[in-house]
Image (cartoon, grey):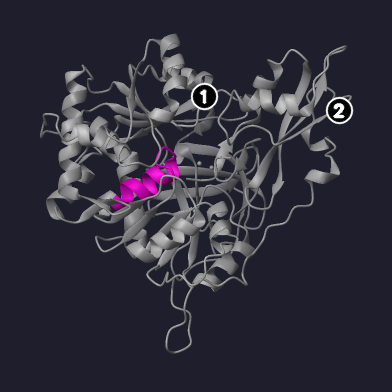
Amino acid sequence: MTNLAHILTESARRYPDRPAFRVDDVVVTYAELDALTARAAARLRARGVLPGDRVAIALPNVLAFPVLYYGVLRAGATVVPMNPLLKARELEHHFRDSGAALALVWSTVAAEADSAAAATGTTAVVVDEETVAAVAEWPATEDVAARDDADTAVILYTSGTTGTPKGAQLTHANLRRNATTFVDMFDFGPGDVVAGCLPFFHAFGQSNALNASILAGASVSLVQRFDAAKVLQLIERHGVTVFEGVPTMYVGLLHTDLGPVDTSSLRMCVSGGAALPVEVLNGFEETFGAPILEGYGLTETSPTATFNRLGHTKPGSIGLPIDGVDMKVVDRNGAEVPSGEVGEIVIRGHNVMKGYWNRPDATAAAIVDGWFHTGDMAVRDDDGFYFVVDRKKDIIIRGGYNIYPREIEEVLYEHPAVREAAVIGVPHATHGEEVAAAITLRAGAAATPDELREYVRTRVAAYKYPRHVWLVDKLPKGSTGKILKREIDFPAEILGTSTPSGRDRGHRPSDPNGRHRHTEPAAAPTT
């Protein structure tokens, strides 16, 4: 079993009548999902898609996502998942860089995708609410294309301080092993019901929610857009046993005025995508009675690298390395540092990507002697638990989504009035971090913060544009002329935020004995 699509065909053989996905009251069984992906694969082949070709998918968490995702894999092609909130300039880079000949895009992104496709020669096909019904009428092919473990299954775009998005090549073996490890670690099974809130186009949701659930034969209740009140009702209605989310989701669940909701079906929750404040973790567990297990990973590590385990956790920690993965903390020379000292996290194992697509230099810089250098600074305690303390890179993590300052700065520099710009992250009570921009103007030019904010907002995805923009006479610089972001003075009104705990909130009825019934660098908040 090499092609990642076999995790679906095998579960369909074992659990044909088990619900694979629920969308409100609509249920799609494993047998039905398997048949739909077979028809999607046949249509792709008829369009000339060959093994190894790249097919872009820009879809939210709708039923069409798993149908087309596994359909592309089944045809032997490589999936290039994209956020459906991306704008034309962002899609154009992804299309051109990946060489995708075909893009399957949600109806809301059709205009942006058409513009990008016209510039790259990519064929954009619009997907909407009626697509799955249409797929059911297409001819089917029962076979699954043969692929090798080392073949690229998915290209997920990420970036670093250079601001140039790079495609991380995740192989069939990377993703299958990552899903298998997650299933084994948390004893996932066909009796589990998973809340599908994490966006599947993101590495976290794709591996830990989509692939892991399909591998286990579990049922996924799809949530296209996260709404805390609706999710709590969904947990009660569908008997959700596993909730996977980013910290902002847990904050939202804690602060929802909904009245009593029975979430006693929850047996565990996992958090990733950004650091989970200990106060939020404690407040959630006190309120809902279900443990939150925090983990850590990156797109380049498929993504899971560490997790806390049931009965073996430390608040504030990202946990222990998963099975088959080695991790250590090193100094700038690559030497491992003693427990308790800060260094950079490096990772080696089955989860490390094949490399960046068509970027051998970037691959060589990131993977040294088999160790992937994360750029994240951490300490390891005497028990082997890891604690992230800072980020070596300038990445801003807003609501679990990575935002790369250089990308936003490039947009600002396109404005005729902007002389210099520095984009940085500032603390935010619910999103973790918010995007902020300090800007100097060209001599004689005029522009207001509102104008500059709007300029960026129309050119990047909704979660990326800077909510805080202010003008300064000059930006602090070092001896080489590099802007020193750490020395930028912030307006007082954007500092001093705190993270709410919500621990005094209650959603669960008590059982007859007076106890509460049990209730892891996008979906995550998009505005």
Q: Which quarter of the picture shows residue 42? A: top left
- Tag shown at residue 472: 2
- For image coordinates 44% across by 27% down, the residue present is 109
Q: Earlier in the sequence, mark 2 or mark 1?
A: 1
The residue that disc 1 covers is: 87
> Compared to 349, does 228 lie above or below?
below
Residue 481, how many percent across, how many down? 81, 21
Image spot of residue 77 (x, y percent): 26, 26
Amino acid type at mark 2: Val
Mark linked to residue 9: none
> Which quarter shows the N terminus?
top left
**Magenta includes 324?**
no
Cα gap from disc 2 to disc 1, whole angstroms: 29 Å
The reply to whether residue 146 is in sight is no
Q: Quadrant of residue 488?
A: top right
Asked if residue 499 is positioned above or below residue 75 in the image, the reply reads: below
The magenta segment: 199-213
State left or right for residue 138 relative to residue 393: left
In front here: 136 or 2? 136
Under tag 1, what secondary structure? loop
Label 2 Cα crowd, 10 Å radius (few <14 / some 14-19 / many 20+): few
Q: Where residue 409 sits: x, y (%)? A: 68, 24
Label 2 element class: loop
